[in-house]
């Protein structure tokens, strides 16, 4: 060979070696590449392997993957493989470091048989995906390549190393025996332990077949689930997702694999399964699980596409042994709202009229039909919240043929909730009759055949009442400062109070049954209650027989006269006097109790000039029943008191103030030590009665006040006033009288007893 030719060949060889060196190195960083030269397979990468063969003396396991994620076992059985276990095997070869190397030329009498490699205990074949190679200036695909790893004996008994050989090399490599333990797997190690594999959000169909029953089929449309067989209805998305979650997490223990023999399928009841569940995904993959005979607390099961028979816990069977109604949506209506936000109209259609309520900026909610009046926004809000949360109790009828039996024919109430544009579609459903017990009522959704029952609580009566229930509960409103007169008729007495605006401070004067200054707080309590009277419920728009409500002979009448607000029409020239404001009188009649036996029952009521009957609360009636004058018996100016007399069957005391403004005991004219007299006067000033029994001094004998058991008389420069204590009334009260007002009061006994006891027990020196 010529010298020139030799040089050319050497240059070509050098270029080839450099290419191989650079091609290998460009896949790894320099330091990583150096480290990999210490590995058994320096150019090995996990993601390049798509097929594995584990050959032992009596068995061979073949595993393959098309995407390097999902693996299947091809031999000795056709099964899904456990991808995690496969990855563990593959990872052993990526970092399999050489402990030592025995080369053929360096060992005497070298033979693979000396290392157990002539008949290896395990042979591992690893196939690589077709890998790209450079051919000229283009990239093409090379042929499939394979690693073959023969595993021989351990270095010595009890040693933690083992001999291996890579096919194509005559070297024997020593590696740690831990490597052998991690790749020596059997079928149960490598089979997939999950009964199902899917992404819950990718599931679009679930089918449950229980024995000979009709199958239950549920399908997903967008984000909603529907029961499509044997009935058609919205599905319970939460319940269906719970089932999918349970199946997704159904894992089989290695010890629970029973058999892989086809002839055992019938033996364990899996040829005619008790229950079959099939789950289909958007990828078109359908996975089915059969459940057969039971044994103790376990059930034999298998997938339809695999031969493996295994145990699952019997709770799986009980969780899946369902009726179609179990998977139907329990919520009657589905729409989102916070109160009435996003809702622009509510309509209730009755056989003879339509109630329409619209949301306005000015009035919030307004009834536009059958009459134009403000609607009660709280009632509308509660009604919306209630129908939004209605839970189906029973699925009564799916035939679509028996609506009249449930009151869902021509006599039903049709409810429509209109959403704002962009807030969702109109919600519409029908309300029929209530069941015999009244706890449930029948409903159906518009355009659907199914009849359901739902609770009537705080919903049914409101819907049936319609206009009466939804109209504004404000029955009287006026500016409280415009009130001029109030009159109360109760217990056979009439009480009339008139406003006095002549002074700097507004006063109220009682003109009947006596003339005196009224208690402003008591009068305001009545006026303020009436000035914005919101009733609990509208009972009826009218009644032919008021006696039903006790309004033919009301026990209480409350009248208020107020000046009607509003400006006078027309121009008023300078100097003209404004015409007087119109005065309006409204009289409230209070009838019987809704619950006669209940002390705190609501009452029936109406105005004399209006037919509407409504209910008011017992606190309102209590406000109207107050006494309109002060309950304080005395308002004594202690500085003006000149004399004090106390009369008791056991003792009589008399005191006078001397010129030094000191108390003297009479008739001895002896100075009184201490502040006994001042304490008695102060105690009288604090006396407050529970009620006024009568506004006169007539018939005092029946109150024991004609000859009182105890009296205190206080003298001032303006005259005298006396506290008279009569007989007891019940266990805790007694009758008392003030000489100035001449009224008979009912007072708590302990307030009087304090004064009496101090008057009797205090030592007067």
Image: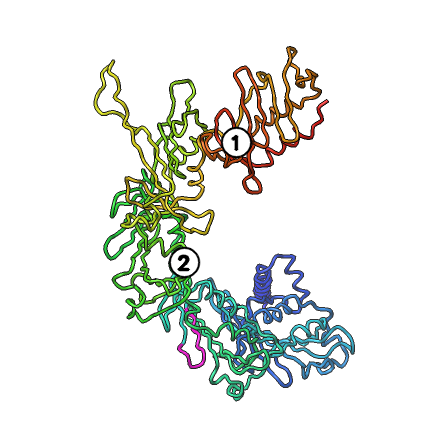
Residue at x 65%, y 79% (from the top left corner) = 122
Check disc 2 and report the residue beneath it.
390
State left or right for residue 475 relative to residue 207: left
Q: Give the structural element (helix, strand or loop) at label 1.
A: loop
**In-front residue for pair 29/687:** 687
**In-front residue for pair 143/511:** 511
Residue 125, labelled with which disc?
none
Which part of the image, by quadrant, shows the C terminus?
A: top right
Task: Judge the density around disc 1: few (<14), some (14-19), many (≥20) Cα neighbours within 10 Å.
Answer: some
State left or right for residue 157 relative to residue 577: right
Residue 760: name its quadrant: top right
**In-front residue for pair 168/762:** 762
Q: Is residue 445 above or below residue 561?
A: below
- First of labels 2, 1 by sequence position: 2
Task: Judge the density around disc 2: few (<14), some (14-19), many (≥20) Cα neighbours within 10 Å.
Answer: some
* Numbered-mark total: 2
Q: Kindly tell me whether residue 77 is visible in this rendering.
A: yes
In this view, the mark in front (2 or 1): 1
Q: Is residue 551 above or below residue 283?
A: above
Residue 472: name its quadrant: top left
Q: Is residue 211 above or below residue 369?
A: below
Check disc 1 and report the residue beneath it.
706
Judge whether residue 592 is colored magenta: no
Which part of the image, by quadrant, shows the N terminus?
A: bottom right
Residue at x 60%, y 62% (from the top left corner) = 21
**Magenta segment boundaries in residue numbering:** 205-214
Q: Identify the residue at the far top of this view.
A: 659
The chief SS type of the magenta part is strand
């Amino acid at each position: 060979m010529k010298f020139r030719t030799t040089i050319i060949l050497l240059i070509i060889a050098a270029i080839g070696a450099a290419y191989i060196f650079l091609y290998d190195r460009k896949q790894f960083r320099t330091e990583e590449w150096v480290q990999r030269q210490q590995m058994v397979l320096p150019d090995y990468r996990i993601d390049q392997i798509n097929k594995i063969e584990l050959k032992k003396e009596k068995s061979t396991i073949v595993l393959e993957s098309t995407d390097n994620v999902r693996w299947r076992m091809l031999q000795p059985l056709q099964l899904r493989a456990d991808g995690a276990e496969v990855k563990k095997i593959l990872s052993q070869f990526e970092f399999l470091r050489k402990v030592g190397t025995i080369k053929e030329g360096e060992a005497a009498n070298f033979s693979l048989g000396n290392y157990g490699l002539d008949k290896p205990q395990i042979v591992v074949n690893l196939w690589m995906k077709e890998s790209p190679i450079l051919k000229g200036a283009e990239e093409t695909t090379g042929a499939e390549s394979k690693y073959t790893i023969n595993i021989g004996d351990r270095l010595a008994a009890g040693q933690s190393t083992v001999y291996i050989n890579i096919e194509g090399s005559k070297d024997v490599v020593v590696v740690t025996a831990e490597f052998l333990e991690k790749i020596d797997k059997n079928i149960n190690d490598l089979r997939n332990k999950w009964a199902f594999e899917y992404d819950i959000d990718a599931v679009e169909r679930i089918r449950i077949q229980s024995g000979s029953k009709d199958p239950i089929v549920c399908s997903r449309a967008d984000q909603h689930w529907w029961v499509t067989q044997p009935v058609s209805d919205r599905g319970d998305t939460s319940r269906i997702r719970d089932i999918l979650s349970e199946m997704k997490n159904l894992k089989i223990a290695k010890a629970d694999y029973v058999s892989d023999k086809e002839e055992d399928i019938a033996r364990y009841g899996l040829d005619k399964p008790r229950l079959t569940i099939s789950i289909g995904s958007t990828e078109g993959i359908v996975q089915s699980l059969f459940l057969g005979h039971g044994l103790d607390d376990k059930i034999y099961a298998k997938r339809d596409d695999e031969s493996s028979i295994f145990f699952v816990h019997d709770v799986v069977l009980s969780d899946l042994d369902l009726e179609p109604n179990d998977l139907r949506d329990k919520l009657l209506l589905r729409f989102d709202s916070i109160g009435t936000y996003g809702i622009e109209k509510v309509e209730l259609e009755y056989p003879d009229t339509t109630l329409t309520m619209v949301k306005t900026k000015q009035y919030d909610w307004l009834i536009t039909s059958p009459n134009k009046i403000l609607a009660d926004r709280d009632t509308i809000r509660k009604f919306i919240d209630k129908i939004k949360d209605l839970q189906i109790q029973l699925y009564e009828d799916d035939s679509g043929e028996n609506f009249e039996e449930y009151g869902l024919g021509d006599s039903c109430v049709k409810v429509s909730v209109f959403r704002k544009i962009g807030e969702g579609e109109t919600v519409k459903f029908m309300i029929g009759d209530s069941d015999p017990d009244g706890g449930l009522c029948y409903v159906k959704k518009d355009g659907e055949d199914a009849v359901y029952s739902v609770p009537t609580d705080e919903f049914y009566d409101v819907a049936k009442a319609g206009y009466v229930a939804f109209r504004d509960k404000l029955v009287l409103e006026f500016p409280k400062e415009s009130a001029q007169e109030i009159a109360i008729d109760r217990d056979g007495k009439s009480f009339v109070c008139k406003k006095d605006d002549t002074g700097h401070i507004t006063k109220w004067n009682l003109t009947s049954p006596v003339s005196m200054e009224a208690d402003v707080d008591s009068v305001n309590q009545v006026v303020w209650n009436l000035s914005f009277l919101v009733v609990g419920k509208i009972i009826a728009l009218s009644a032919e027989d008021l006696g039903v409500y006790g309004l033919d002979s009301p026990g209480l009448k409350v009248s208020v006269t107020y000046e009607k607000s509003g400006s006078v029409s027309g121009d008023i020239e300078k100097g003209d006097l404004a015409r007087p404001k119109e005065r309006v009188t409204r009289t409230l009649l209070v009838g019987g109790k809704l619950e006669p036996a209940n002390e705190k029952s609501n009452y029936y009521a109406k105005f004399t000039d209006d037919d509407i009957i409504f209910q008011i609360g017992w606190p309102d009636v209590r406000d109207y029943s107050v006494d309109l004058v002060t309950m304080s018996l005395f308002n004594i100016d202690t500085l003006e008191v000149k004399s004090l007399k106390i009369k008791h069957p056991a003792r009589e005391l008399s005191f006078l103030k001397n010129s030094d403004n000191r108390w003297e005991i009479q008739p001895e004219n002896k100075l009184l030590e201490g502040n006994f007299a001042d304490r008695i006067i102060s105690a009288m000033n604090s006396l407050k009665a529970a009620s006024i029994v009568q506004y006169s001094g007539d018939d005092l004998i029946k109150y024991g006040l004609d000859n009182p058991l105890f009296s205190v008389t206080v003298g001032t420069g303006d005259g005298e006033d006396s506290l008279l204590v009569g007989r007891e009334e019940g266990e805790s009260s007694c009758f008392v009288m003030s000489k100035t007002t001449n009224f008979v009061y009912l007072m708590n006994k302990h307030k009087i007893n304090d004064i009496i006891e101090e008057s009797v027990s205090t030592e007067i020196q």
